[in-house]
Image (cartoon, grey):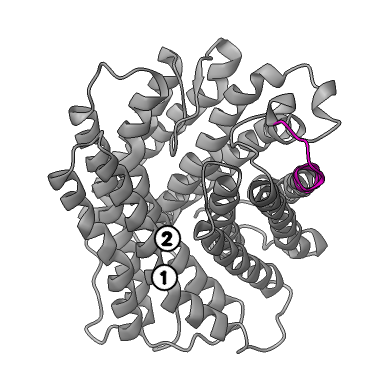
């Protein structure tokens, strides 16, 4: 159908695989939330003085970021790619999941087994410890197997390019983008001088692939928006063939990435600037989808009980992602406006994936997330994160609070700086509550309200 942006849910073993990736993502978020409590408290005025673990800030930040941004996002890629999979021999699919799950477990426990020496490089911060690297290597290998297996799975398309085909094309582009990101990591590993020390080495190692991976997330975000809009009772004003066109436009900046590697040294300023500009202006290719989904928000009847949390997740995701994108064009210098920007964008993606988790639960045979907690969770989480990034933007705009600092090292002096970071801390605590609400809803539906995956 021309406007039905949804995909059929697989059955049997393929459905159980979807459930497994969903559970892995939820458990990663649960662990990330535990680490985030220390992060927010260690940067909140009048509170950080009472925390005896402030020295643990950077270690907690590394694991929190890797779980909530890298593993949660890539696990949800596993969810959506598996939804679009086909029945058959799933041995490679399950191998990918087990490698990723084991790697996630190792990353979670590594700090409690003595892993430390955190490095706050961009995209994939690390702990310089063999155990942590072992966990990261296992997860990366699992994701590589997942991406290759998903790309090798042939999904028939309707030559009429209907709405479902548009979603499949978006998922196909996200797989290619993910593999290009992994190839970029490999190229950077081969080309980055080994005599570089500390964070500089990992900054260059993850810079190119990290930027490419953002386009993977963006494509999965749009797939989620369109499916959520349809499922929550909105009429998306776009036909399938137009969706294919706009997905192709959104994917096109990724094709420029190899040329950045070809014409610039990996450790050059031109390499860094090339990927920065690619993401800044390449991200504008999502504007057509933003306008289409925004227009869809005004087309729909009153939502029923199952549609309310889906609509809340969709609207809050759209708001946070747009605000984060705008803040990206307001960055001046190296201060907390930068995390304000990427927190907005990242949370926009997270909220869309939360909404998709709600959407998939009853389709996978689990209880539907209904009731006040499910209805309010996206708004609580989104509001908290909006407060969080607003506080960071105020502190970065009026002051010069450096990113990745905590406690007295922040150097809070002026009223706008103190007020901004206070708002950041309050918003962070509200967001933690919203994140906890999501985990509670998912735990109840996935583990305590019936069986699914058949």
Q: Main secondary structure of the magenta part?
A: helix
Quarter holding the N terminus?
A: bottom left
Q: Which residue is the site of mark 2? A: 218
Element type where label 1 sits in the image: helix
Q: Confirm or deny contact between disc 1 and disc 2 (CB under 8 A).
A: yes
Q: Which residue is the site of mark 1? A: 286
Give how far across and how far down residue 226 sits, in percent.
48, 74
Who's the residue at 47% across and 89% down the image?
A: 237
Q: Is residue 50 above or below residue 175?
A: above
Q: Is residue 260 left or right of residue 280?
A: left
Which residue occupies the foreground of this view, 61 or 107? 61
Who's the residue at 51% across and 70% down the image?
A: 225
Q: Considering only order in the chain, which callout, 2 or 1, is on the residue closer to the N terminus?
A: 2
Inspect this view and state whether residue 11 appears.
Answer: no
Q: Quadrant of residue 223?
A: bottom left
Q: Is residue 299 above or below residue 188?
A: below
Q: Quadrant of residue 158?
A: bottom left
Q: Is residue 419 magenta?
A: yes
Q: Is residue 46 magenta?
A: no
Magenta span of residues: 411-423
Who's the residue at 23% across and 28% down the image?
A: 192
Cα–Cα gap, marks 1 and 2 = 8 Å
């Amino acid at each position: 159908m021309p406007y039905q942006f949804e995909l059929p849910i697989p059955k049997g073993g393929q459905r159980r695989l979807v459930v497994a990736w969903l559970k892995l993502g939820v458990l990663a978020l649960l662990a990330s939330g535990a680490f985030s409590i220390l992060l927010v408290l260690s940067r909140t005025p009048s509170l950080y003085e009472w925390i005896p673990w402030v020295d643990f800030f950077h270690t907690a930040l590394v694991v929190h970021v890797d779980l909530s941004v890298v593993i949660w996002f890539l696990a949800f890629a596993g969810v959506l790619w598996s939804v679009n999979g086909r029945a058959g021999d799933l041995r490679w699919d399950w191998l990918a999941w087990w490698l990723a799950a084991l790697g996630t477990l190792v990353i979670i426990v590594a700090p409690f087994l003595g892993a430390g020496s955190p490095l706050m490089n961009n995209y994939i911060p690390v702990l310089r410890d063999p155990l942590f690297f072992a966990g990261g290597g296992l997860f990366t290998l699992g994701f590589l197997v997942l991406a290759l297996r998903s790309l090798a799975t042939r999904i028939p398309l309707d030559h009429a390019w209907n709405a479902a085909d548009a979603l499949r094309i978006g998922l196909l582009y996200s797989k290619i983008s993910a593999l290009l990101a992994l190839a970029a990591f490999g190229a950077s590993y081969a080309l980055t001088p080994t005599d570089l020390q500390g964070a500089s080495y990992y900054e260059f190692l993850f810079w190119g692939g990290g930027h490419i991976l953002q386009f993977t997330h963006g494509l999965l975000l749009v797939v989620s928006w369109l499916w959520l809009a349809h499922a929550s009772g909105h009429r998306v004003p776009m036909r399938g063939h137009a969706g294919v066109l706009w997905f192709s436009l959104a994917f096109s900046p990724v094709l420029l990435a190899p040329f950045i590697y070809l014409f610039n040294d990996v450790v050059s300023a031109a390499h860094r600037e090339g990927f920065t500009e690619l993401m800044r202006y390449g991200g504008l290719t999502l504007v057509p989808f933003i306008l289409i989904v925004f227009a869809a928000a005004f087309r729909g009847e009153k939502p029923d009980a199952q549609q309310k949390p889906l609509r809340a997740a969709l609207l809050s995701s759209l708001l946070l992602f747009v605000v984060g994108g705008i803040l990206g064009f307001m960055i001046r210098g190296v201060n907390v406006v930068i995390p304000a920007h990427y927190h907005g964008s990242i949370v926009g993606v997270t909220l869309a994936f939360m909404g998709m988790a709600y959407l998939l639960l009853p389709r996978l045979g689990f209880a539907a997330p209904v009731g006040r907690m499910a209805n309010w969770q996206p708004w609580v989480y989104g509001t908290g994160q909006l407060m969080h990034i607003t506080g960071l933007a105020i502190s970065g705009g009026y002051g010069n609070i450096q990113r990745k600092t905590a406690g007295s090292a922040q150097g809070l002096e002026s009223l706008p700086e103190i007020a901004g970071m206070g708002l950041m801390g309050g918003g962070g605590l509200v967001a933690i509550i919203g994140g906890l609400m999501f985990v509670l809803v998912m735990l109840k539906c996935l583990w305590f309200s019936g069986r699914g995956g058949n």
